[in-house]
Image (tube, rainbow, N blue to C red):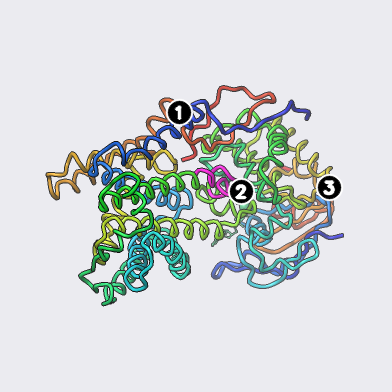
Amino acid sequence: MALPSFQVETQTKASAVFGIAAAAALLIAFAAPLLVSRGVIQDLFFILTMLVLAQNWNLLAGYAGLISVGQQVFVGFGAYAMFGCVILFGVDPLVAVLIAGVLSTLLAIPTAFFTFRLYGPYFAIGTWVVAEVVRLLLAQWKALGGGTGTSLPRDATRDMLGVGLMRDVFDMKASQAGDALTYWLALILAALTVGFIYRLLRSKQGLGLAAVRDNEQAARAVGVDARRMKAFVYLATAFITGIAGALIYVQKARISPDAAFSVTDWTAYVIFIVVIGGIGTVEGPIVGVIVFFLLQNLLAGYGSWYLLVLGLIGIGVMLFAPRGLWGLVSDRTGIQLFPVRRMLKGGSLNQTSKGGPHG
Amino acid sequence: MTILQLEGVSKKFGALTVAEQISFAVGEGEALGIIGPNGAGKSTLFNLITGNIATDSGTIRFCGSDVTRASPMARCLSGMGRTFQIPQPFEKLTVFENLLVAGSFGSRRQEHEVSVRCAEILGDTGLIDKANVPAGGLTLLQRKRLELARALATEPKLLLLDEIAGGLTEEECRSLVATIRAIHAKGIAVIWIEHVLHALNSVVERLLVLHFGKVIGIGKPAEIMDSRAVREIYLGIEI
Ligand SMILES: Nc1ncnc2c1ncn2[C@@H]1O[C@H](COP(=O)(O)OP(=O)(O)OP(=O)(O)O)[C@@H](O)[C@H]1O
Ligand SMILES: [Mg+2]
């Protein structure tokens, strides 16, 4: 059959406009430490690091089908690796953050070896068990404070790479400069993470990953190496999560096993963010983290009611908007800010049908 | 030249023997039909050939090499394309993306190198109007066409088709037969499991009859249809 020429498109009008807006927002965000108070910078740091964790969990669960409830292992391990480098070897905290990422990836190799033998719910339980084991082991490490934890030496953060420069250039106090620095790093990390994930999803490997998520047996039957793909995603998210964990604890400057390996802080909240925002989309975690931050501030005074309300909202969204808040918006308007659909155009195709987002 | 050769392939599910000492060969570019009553082990035989189910004993050779222990992925990459009797689409991907996955991974090429070919296959299989629709929204018949289209996108040397003609109207069946003939005419070997015998017999050069996991006949369609064993099994079934 002779067909007129076809093209494949992924760009949408909204995404082109959004691209420009996002670049502008990024520039403004970079200037933020010079414009807003330290408290706001700390809030933004929290939002950015949670966004990084959420994007990673979304890639893991929403694309690779690896539902982990043990990602706190990489946050905690990354944080402890950074503390170890700084306290025991006098490494600069920022260099230690990168080392923490590498060490987290190394930790992911044996844990993958164990958990990848498990399927579905057993995988989830396996990841949680691994996290508990690593927490218990690190709690034995007396040089890093054992079960009660320890703090970063004051001068380690004061003399951190770049802090001196910022004190001179912007005339900031050391603590203020430290916050600005970690904020910038969080901003860069968040931008790189979103960029990396979006690029991955638009690549051939991303398409293969979506196929594995939808039907692993069929994906293997058309030549997709499902195991290798999942392993790559698992290792990549371990790397980024480890870096995020280390960075969070450079800013906190105080660590304990219970906090660094907290399943609530680093996994439950993260899952909540992804689920309310919309799993399986890049936009979802962005929407989710903003909603989460607002709720957290709104409910700050209500103690444990706070968790209860979060849980109820999570369940409500799962029941009535299974594709999350972003799913609702995108279904109504057809808007996609990070389009990954390969739309076939040209030929004898009618142009009416819309693909909608992948998730 | 043989493209596929089975020697003494056996498989049991617990006490149930679904393949017993199965041996046969398929030549390059040949079309072989497989018939047999429900539960005879036809789909299981496909799964043994593609590696979705491991054999208990026997060897399977494909394109000259022993693939008995190879993964389904490796067998696909070496040139086996298959459809599933119960369609297994990538539901959240569009029909076109379903083919892109198969095209780019199955033939180890980049998406842009295979996109035009995938679009052409959609045209050939009558799915072009559904190209940008998520596969989860297709009807059963469309899903079966997608199975065929996706298998073709992997650029197979051997195409395994499992009951893709059931439930079609006369008209649709004729067009399906024409499509498969065209595929076969390009030199692709075909093994086709089908209960719709007139469609099957208008394409294949040989027929294989499977009964309780055993090959009870293989040869020219006319001879097979005339044989006693087949008449007994198919007694009462319209030919
Ligand atoms: N994974 C399995 N475990 C146990 N028994 C199975 C399994 N798969 C198939 N069977 C059984 O093996 C036998 C052969 O099944 P198979 O699907 O190969 O038959 P078939 O010839 O394709 O039948 P149909 O014409 O209905 O598609 C059936 O009795 C079936 O119930
Ligand atoms: Mg069958």
Can you identify the residue that label 3 sits on? Answer: B187
Residue neighbourhood size for the residue with mark 2, other residues' Cα within 10 Å, grouped as few (<14), some (14–19), many (≥20)? some
Give the chain letter at badge 1. Answer: A
State the predominant SS element of the stretch in magenta. helix
Of residues A178 and A346, the one nearer the viewer is: A178
Residue B192 appearing in the image: yes
Can you identify the residue that label 2 sits on? Answer: B85
Q: Nearer the viewer, mark 3 or mark 2?
A: 3
Task: Specify the farthest residue to the front.
Answer: A168
Disc 3 under 8 Å from ligand 2? The reply is no
Badge 1 element: loop
Same-chain check, marks 1 and 3: no
Badge 2 element: loop
| Residue A344 position (above or below residue A125) | above
User: Does residue A207 show up magenta in the picture?
Assistant: yes
- Amino acid found under the numbered disc labelled 3: Gly
Can you identify the residue that label 1 sits on? Answer: A335
| Residue A255 position (above or below residue A316) | below
Q: In the image, which residues are magenta?
A: A198-209
- Dot 3 and dot 2 residues touching (CB under 8 Å): no
- Where residue B152 sits: x, y (%)? 71, 44
Q: CA distance from mark 2 to mark 1?
A: 37 Å
Q: Nearer the viewer, mark 2 or mark 1?
A: 1
Same-chain check, marks 2 and 1: no
Q: CA distance from mark 3 to mark 2?
A: 24 Å
Q: Nearer the viewer, mark 1 or mark 3?
A: 1
Residue neighbourhood size for the residue with mark 3, other residues' Cα within 10 Å, grouped as few (<14), some (14–19), many (≥20)? some
- Amino acid found under the numbered disc labelled 1: Ile
